[in-house]
Image (cartoon, helix red, strand yellow):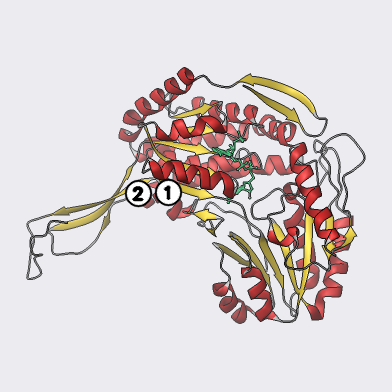
Amino acid sequence: MAIQSVNPTTEEVIATYEEFTARQIDDALGEAAGAFEKWRRLSVAGRSACMRQAAGYLRAQKERFARLITLEMGKPISQAEAEIEKCAWNCDYYAESAAGYLAERPIQTNARESYVAFEPLGVVLAVMPWNFPFWQVFRFAAPALMAGNTAVLKHASNVPQCALAIEEIFQESGFPAGTFRTLLASSGQVAGIIADERVRAVTLTGSDLAGANIAETAGRNLKKTVLELGGSDAFIVLADADLADAAHVGALARNQNTGQSCIAAKRFIVEDAVADEFERRLTDEVVHLKVGDPMERDTHVGPLARGDLRDGVERQVRMSVNQGARVAVGGQRLSRGGYFYAPTILTEVSESMPVLREETFGPIAAVLRVPDAETAIASANDSVYGLGASLWTANLEQARHLARRIETGVVFVNGMVASDPRLPFGGIRRSGYGRELGEFGIHEFTNIQTVWIGPARGEDRPKPHSE
Ligand code: NAP
């Protein structure tokens, strides 16, 4: 089957690739498994040197890679450049911090010496989405490779050029051949790759549907998984919030990457007392967003990445309006070529509407009014997802209490939810499990190995035990 790269701004096919044959996949897995023996024996300092080169390569080729992102999935070019910068930062961050994160941890017991060591697992399969086609891959790859694993990537079918460019970065940065391989594979080929005994673990960033499929196959094969899935993040505005700031950041948090972010603000939950003013301010911010050609530097909102994704957004808005939502702004596709949909705000929404019940992966904000902070937290938690949440209030003491009651993996107070190499990132419920980034992220794909060196000392010598 052919894998096509389609420019969502023009709807033109810009490149076509043949899907890998079973033989090509087998060869790539063989290379990754072979490279593992070499790569794991390299010191952390040696791995860091390669990772720093990758950061340098990303920065040197930033414009070319950013253009590829914009061509293949329509991200506005200035945001695509920022994505490449962030990948380079992540490489540098793990090059710097991995030695500390992977150092042996002494733990005092009755042993002469006991400690925890972190050993790599082997070849890790990454199944990745198109929405941040470089960042999602580097978010996984920098820590996984620094821990001594090797990787094979099955990227989303609509970003094959980005997938091949990422392989090039590792090839050109001193990593042993096979350390990172891109497989131009379809989702139908993934189960066979997971079952291959050379693959030791799997990570998926994508929809909850794909997550359930992959977890099922991995479970049958008893392989470790990390799942970073969808979200329907709440953006909670309490009556004492700085409304100008909240509306400005809220418009960005909803429309960045044309609304196609797992941690985009999707459900705006606003206290009644300030709802009129917040809606007015949010509308004012949204109407000033420039929608257009994503190659132009001042464009804020580009096309959606694929035609079927726009159809999905359109359906969610139509059904919600049929159920009584009011279109404050937008609410329709643009009458031009490309998969454009107008930045939209829906008000008078209720809990049963698709814009609140489902993940909305496009520039659609739904504003729900609530009587008080208690109801706001209950509404925020009324979702099958649990990825991120943003809470806006001047009362930071109250914010600390409320944050702990929000059932998500990430809570930002008076700020936009964002990933950061230094902070663990991930969700609960149908948003997945496991963590990426920070110290927790690098340990996901390691064997957390207990080493006990005797003879035992002192009184608390353990009784002989078979487990
Ligand atoms: P998707 O349709 O689930 O695809 C993600 C990846 O999984 C693609 O490589 C896709 O391959 C593959 N895939 C899909 N179904 C599969 C199956 N049954 N078996 C094996 N592989 C399968 O998601 P998407 O539309 O690309 O991305 C958007 C979703 O990702 C949203 O739900 C978003 O919230 C989520 N996301 C989550 C995070 C996070 O950190 N939590 C970050 C970004 C995005 P094909 O392209 O070949 O179908």
Q: Quadrant of residue 383?
A: bottom right
For badge 1, the amino acid type reads Ile
Residue 442: image tag:
1
In this orientation, which residue lies closer to the viewer: 229 or 124?
229
**In this rendering, the label closer to the viewer, 1 or 2:** 1
Considering only vertical position in the picture, is 274 above or below 438? Answer: below
Quadrant hosting ligand 1: top right
Q: Quadrant of the C terminus?
A: bottom left
Dot 2 crowding, Cα within 10 Å, few <14, some 14–19, many 20+: many
Mark 1 and 2 residues: CB-CB less than 8 Å, in contact?
yes
Image height of 423 relative to 6, above or below: below
- Residue positioned 72% across, 44% down in the render: 79
Q: Position of residue 168 (x, y in %)?
A: 55, 25
Q: Identity of the amino acid at label 2?
A: Leu
On the image, the x and y values in percent for residue 291 come to: 86, 45
The quarter in which the N terminus is drawn is: top right
CA gap between label 1 and label 2 equals 8 Å
Residue labelled with disc 2 = 102
Q: Is mark 1 within 8 Å of ligand 1?
A: no
The residue lying toward the viewer, choosing from 163 and 96, is: 163
Indicate which disc residue 357 carries.
none
Which percent across, then down, holds residue 85?
Answer: 63, 42
Asked whether, in this view, residue 168 is left or right of residue 99, the answer is right
